[in-house]
Amino acid sequence: MRTIQLWLKRITVLGLLLMMGVSMNADAGLFGHTMSWKEEVRLHDGQVIVAERFYNLGGYPTLESQERAVIDVTATFSLPGTNKKIIWKTDYSNSRPEPNSLNLIRFDVVKGVPYIAAYPAGCIAYNKWGRPNPPQVLLKYENEQWRRITLAEFPAELINAQANVIVGRPASKLLKPFYTVEGVNAENREIDEGPYKTILREVVKPVPCPQYSSGPKAPIPIAPKSSQK
């Protein structure tokens, strides 16, 4: 009888250890994973600066997923001719009520003022940002922070300019530590012309997302490009 009790106790302990192991593995899949790289950014006037891109990653969205979900993104830009760096950050939590979840299209500096063009990464984010059309979000850096501006406030010389940063992220297995301007363009080559690659003035038809509070990801999600040669 005592032998049976010891055996049951060992089985219980083993089960608890296995459960702890599963829990630890699950946590490891949700936290502690990152990817980062540096890339050249060619500004509208021909100057080239360097940006540092950093991604916090979570677990795999599905069993078939090859890439981890993105938790948040930080981009650090070096201003031309100075030692100053500017940081831009966005997170990808659909549960947060405030606008977030942006995919970067372009960073530029006009008359010493930094600007960013991005697009909402999904229908939930698109609705949070007020369903803009063209479906892009434009930002201006002033007073040490990023402020959303209208299309009329955005520099005319940047209208119709194309992406000068990697839109989304490269596939993790193909990630390089540094991308030249040519490498950035190669990463963006497969993105169709339009609001996910070019800063537009005209409205887009049809509207990218139906008007509801939740929905699928936008046509060009933040998923990495897997076909880079």
Image (tube, grey):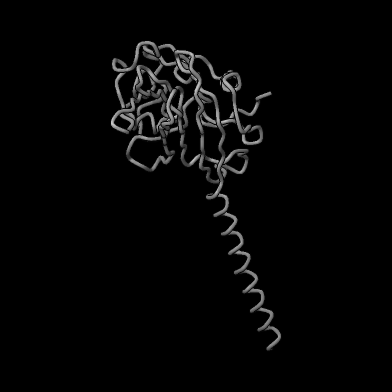
Q: Position of residue 3 (x, y in %)?
A: 71, 86
Residue found at x 66% / y 77%:
10
Q: Quadrant of the N terminus?
A: bottom right
**Farthest residue, direction bottom:** 1
Residue found at x 55% / y 31%:
38
Exactly how many numbered labels are in the figure?
A: 0
| Residue 134, picture quadrant | top left
**Farthest residue, direction right:** 3
| Residue 189, picture quadrant | top right
Q: Position of residue 149 (x, y in %)?
A: 30, 23
Along the line of sight, which residue is nearer the eye, 135 or 114?
114
Q: Is residue 42 above or below residue 32?
A: above
**Farthest residue, direction front:** 82
Along the line of sight, which residue is nearer the eye, 39 or 63?
39
Q: Is residue 187 above or below residue 55?
A: above
Residue found at x 44% / y 18%:
195
Q: Is residue 31 above or below residue 55?
A: below
Q: Left or right: 173 with respect to 107?
A: right
Q: Quadrant of the C terminus?
A: top right
Q: Position of residue 224 (x, y in %)?
A: 58, 31
Q: Position of residue 66 (x, y in %)?
A: 63, 38
Along the line of sight, which residue is nearer the eye, 79 or 167?
79
Along the line of sight, which residue is nearer the eye, 89 or 121?
89
Q: Left or right: 137 with respect to 34?
A: left
